[in-house]
Amino acid sequence: MQRRILPILVSALGLALAAGCATGSSGPTAATPWNQAAVTGLARQLSTAADAWQLALRQQDPAQLGSGTSQEGLRLIQKAQVVSEHARALAGHLDAGEGREQTLDTFRSLKEITDDAQQDQARTITDKPTLAAWSKFTGLVRQVQPYYEK
């Protein structure tokens, strides 16, 4: 009986830890009131972080990413470019004075692509600078996201 309980306990602790990490952001909480200056500043940082992640990936040999196939590495690099373009677009729209309603679709698109890239990033073997750049980027996405929730 103890042999069956231990795996369940370990799984439950893992889920609890994951849930704690997911909610332990230092940014605003859910349904944060719109703040144009704050969101614009975060979006600028987000764009810079997306570019840094893309550069870090490009500096790695695509054959060294993932399971060793260059195709996996190239796919992640392509997603990084799309993420970078969307982050840059979001920052540009906000810099131009567009508000929440005008930039909501851009943010949602960025978030969707980021979620897709998260799955690929989790399956790939990347070096510490790439992981650090990814972590910074996703941390900023989590800080911007509450401003777009209702």
Image: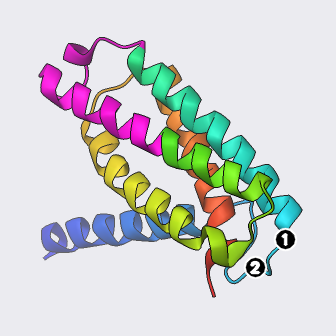
Amino acid type for the residue under numbered disc 1 = Asn
Image coordinates for residue 128, horizontal then vertical, percent = 48, 22
Question: Which residue is identified by label 1?
Answer: 35
In percent of the image, x 33 and y 29: which residue is there?
77
Which quadrant is home to the C terminus?
bottom right
Element on which disc 2 rests: loop
Amino acid type for the residue under numbered disc 2 = Thr
Q: Which residues are magenta?
A: 59-83
Label at residue 12: none
How dense is the environment of label 1, judged by Cα within 10 Å: few (below 14), some, or many (20 and up)?
Answer: few
Q: Nearer the viewer, mark 1 or mark 2?
A: 1
**Distance between mark 1 and mark 2 Cα atoms:** 9 Å
Element on which disc 1 rests: loop
Label at residue 32: 2
Q: Nearer the viewer, residue 14 or 119?
A: 119
> From the viewer's perspective, is 115 left or right of 62?
right
Instruction: Tell me the quarter of the picture where residue 72 sits.
Output: top left
Q: Nearer the viewer, residue 41 or 123?
A: 41
